[in-house]
Amino acid sequence: MNAVLDVQNLYLGVSQKRHYSPILNGVNLEIQRSQIHGLVGESGAGKSMLAKAILGILPSSTTIDKGYIHFKGNDLVGMPRYERRQLASRHIAMIPQDPMTSLNPVRRVGNQLGDVLRLHMKLNRTLAQERVLELLNDVQIRDPKRVVHQYPFELSGGMRQRVLIAMAFSCKPELIIADEPTTALDVTVQRQILQLIKQLQSETGTSVLFISHDLGVIAKICDHVSILHTGNVVEMQSAVNLFQNPRHEYTQNLLEITSHYYRFENTD
Amino acid sequence: MSFPFLLRRLVLVIPTLIGVSIIVFVLLRVVPGDPIMMMIPPGATEDDIDHLRQLYGLDKPILEQYLVWFSEVLKGDFGTSISLRQDVVELILSRLPATIELAVAAMFISVILGTSLALIGTFWSNQWPETIVDGFTGLNQAIPDFLWGLIFILAFGVLWPLLPVSGRIDPRINLDLVSQFYIVESLIRGEFSVFLTLIKHMIMPAIALALPLTAVIARSLKASLRETMTQDYIRMAQVKGFGPWRILIVEALRNAMIPTVALSGVQFNFLLGGTVLIERIFSYPGIGNMSIGAVIDRDLPLIQGLIITFAILFIVTNLVIDMSYRTLNPRVRNE
Amino acid sequence: MSEPTRSGRVHLSSLVRTWLGGIVIGLLILIAIFAPWIAPHDPLKQDLFSGLMAPFWLDNHDPAYLLGTDSLGRDVLSRLIYGTQIALVVAFIAASLAALLGTVLGLLAGYYGGWLDTVVSRLVEIWMAFPPVLLSIVLVAVIGTGLHSVVIAIVIIDWTRFCRVVRAETLVQREQEYISSAVSIGFERWTILWREILPNVLPLLVTLLTLEMGIAVIVEAILSFVGLSVSSDQATWGGLIQEGRQYVHSAWWVMSLPMICIIIAVLAFNALGDGLRTILDPVMRK
Ligand SMILES: Nc1ncnc2c1ncn2[C@@H]1O[C@H](COP(=O)(O)OP(=O)(O)OP(=O)(O)O)[C@@H](O)[C@H]1O
Ligand SMILES: [Mg+2]
């Protein structure tokens, strides 16, 4: 079997004041090894909820009612919390949407990176420090020696996202979940960050679940794409096929609306 | 922590201290009731009174009186205590260490206990431990330190005699300590039996003093911990697989402490002020106890000296709090 | 309050607490007013042959003295009932006056700014440097004992609590747009203060006032305890504590009962204040 992650028939809902509303209705999602898998859907479709379900950080008001999330021969849904944490945190990483709020404001950047290495790679303090410098270098941060001693508020948004990308790739995970990793950044930085993710992914062979509503971005970096609509994956195709030959009506509409923008993106 | 910052803070303190000195002076000289009348022994003649008046410079205009008094104060001379007939500064310095040890112990207890309660209440939020923490803080808002002191005396001194209820040390022990910092010195010298009796005497007054502040810290810290735990970087730490206690303590606590530290300045003043009654109740020989004695004896120079000592203590603690605020919060650290 | 389920619960329980606090305070007020009719004995009448009698649940009690007697044979229950009068009078009058003084200064400083604000802020800062308990004791010692000096002492010490909060809130309100629009219509300045700012700080003020009443009860008890409150032959909770402390080894209940009264009264004021804060705030801010 070549799938890294296999989500099967996942049902998920949220209860507020005894009122239950479903969010995902039997989602299927299969992510192949060493691929970037796009997940597209309108705002509120439940993309982030699906990501949170995989990462195990659903808010307490939400419940998984049915289905499986297969990862490395285990079902993450049914696993005891502690074992799940051990397995998932070691092999699944995350690139967050908002780099401004995703680093601890009172801890030095180097320590935050180093802690992750010490936890998962079992490095000692000095080795971790050296590795942090390499990692920052890999994400093209100039002057890593200075940056490790800085606090997040001293870095720009793009720099912080690079730090978070370094953190995501630091323990050689099998899967990285990137939930709209560029929406909070300005346009010039967006492009650099996308390139960086693409480059690191192809170097390391890690799989990426890339969430976005920007079809232009998806077209650029994804191998496969799933379309999420009304709580369901309505279409899953290779990126090339999807853009040339959309099967589902919803996808066709989506492409129609964004086609102008998409063509523009591709010509430059 | 830069030196210029400290210097600037110290300069800012000067107007406050001058203000305090003016109010102390005016309070005790201008209000109804002639201070001389407070001092004279019964049966003094008019001549005696005039003589006293001259002696204390009370026949001069009030502004001149203040300037004379303040220039003496600047030289470190608060005059002579009327009731104890000793130099005020010497008297205060001999009692100050006892109060400092008590107040520091109480602050230490309240910070440790308050933080622990906040952590427990957050870790098990919406479960019975949080209910207990909330109940404790609610109750503590209604029980001031001196009532706690009396409750302790009742419980552990009378109904279940466990601890000594008065003094700083067992009078039968002959002390050969050189400083008035008994606890510190006995620890340094390794005299643990002395240290133990000192702690036994101090534990009830220190906890009584500490409890109101404990509740304030627990309450405010728990609120900001709750807020902090919803932040994105906490979510990141969970994804990275750090344990829940580690996340609470390493990632959340320091962030959550920043607003709590900012508000604790005023609270420390209440704690310091609390020593006045607590020392009285436990017959603990510090400057708080001395203050009530001085008021009862109408000992003006001593009262003035004591109030200004308390004000200086307050200013110093606030300086320390300010500095720890800057250490905690990297954003303001290097300003 | 981000999670809706929780905020619902908080709101309900704060409503319950407000009612509880209000009811207890109402009862205390009734007790204070009808003290002469409720109290089984004259609180000052001594009976040296029946000193230090135990309360009803202990051995050695006299059914005539439900909560026992003090060392001079005065009925503890009656002294507690009459003590309610002093406690409440001080609580209401001192807290209201402190609120009045602090609010006026805070409003003026916050609204007019300039040198007035500088002076008031400096004063508050200096005030903070005094240990409050010591200051109150010194004040009463200087002014002389009696109900009025207790009230004066509390007002002089605690006006800053109101001033700080009201000043900060006024600064915020002043920045808001509707104030400037009111200015352009041409209201008099004090009318603006009165009509626009005061209603906005009112919820906060009511809460602070209620909490201050609890504090005033404690300060009165402290002063009685030190022997500086009202004249010593009047019944006060603090005075009874001080008396009880002297023979705590033989009659522990004499000290405990007034302590319980103080705690109940302060808890009730706090519950009312905290409850009012959660109830009034979102409504009034809308
Ligand atoms: N904490 C929460 N409690 C209750 N409902 C929530 C919560 N977070 C999200 N929802 C609901 O779940 C649904 C899916 O939200 P989700 O954040 O997964 O959407 P999304 O596809 O990521 O949208 P976007 O593109 O805007 O990020 C939405 O209808 C939202 O209202
Ligand atoms: Mg989302």
Image (cartoon, coloured by chain):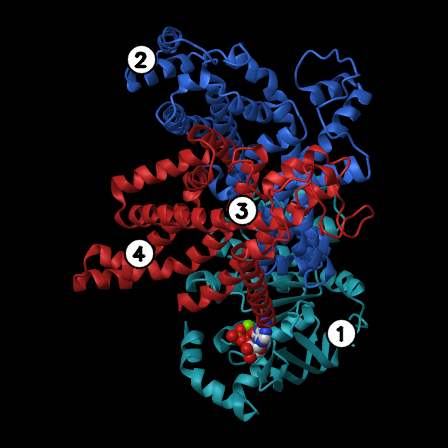
Chain colours: A cyan, B blue, C red
How far apart are labels 1 and 2 at the CA level? 88 Å
- The percent position of residue B195, horizontal first and vertical second, equals 77, 23
Chain letter for the residue marked with disc 1 in the picture? A
**Quadrant housing the C terminus of chain C:** bottom left
Report which residue position mark 3 lands on: C217
Q: Earlier in the sequence, mark 3 or mark 4?
A: 4
State if disc 4 and disc 3 touch (CB < 8 Å): no
Report which residue position mark 2 lands on: B59
Q: Nearer the viewer, mark 3 or mark 4?
A: 3
Chain letter for the residue marked with disc 4 in the picture? C
Give the number of callouts.
Answer: 4
Specify the quadrant of the image occupied by residue B170: top right
Q: Nearer the viewer, mark 2 or mark 4?
A: 2
- B71 in relation to C240, above or below: above
Q: Within 10 angstroms of label 2, few (less than 14), some, or many (20 or more) residues?
A: few
How far apart are labels 2 and 4 at the CA level? 51 Å
Report which residue position mark 4 lands on: C175
- The percent position of residue C153, horizontal first and vertical second, equals 44, 38
Viewer-nearest residue: C221 or A239: C221
- B190 in relation to C66, above or below: above
Report which residue position mark 1 lands on: A77
Q: Tag 3: residue type?
A: Val
Residue A202 can be seen in this image: yes
Q: Tag 2: residue type?
A: Asp
Q: Tag 4: residue type?
A: Glu
How far apart are labels 3 and 2 at the CA level? 40 Å
Viewer-nearest residue: B332 or A177: B332
Same chain for the residues at labels 3 and 1, yes or no?
no
Chain letter for the residue marked with disc 2 in the picture? B
Callout 2: SS: loop
Q: Residue at x 75, y 52 (%)?
A: C63
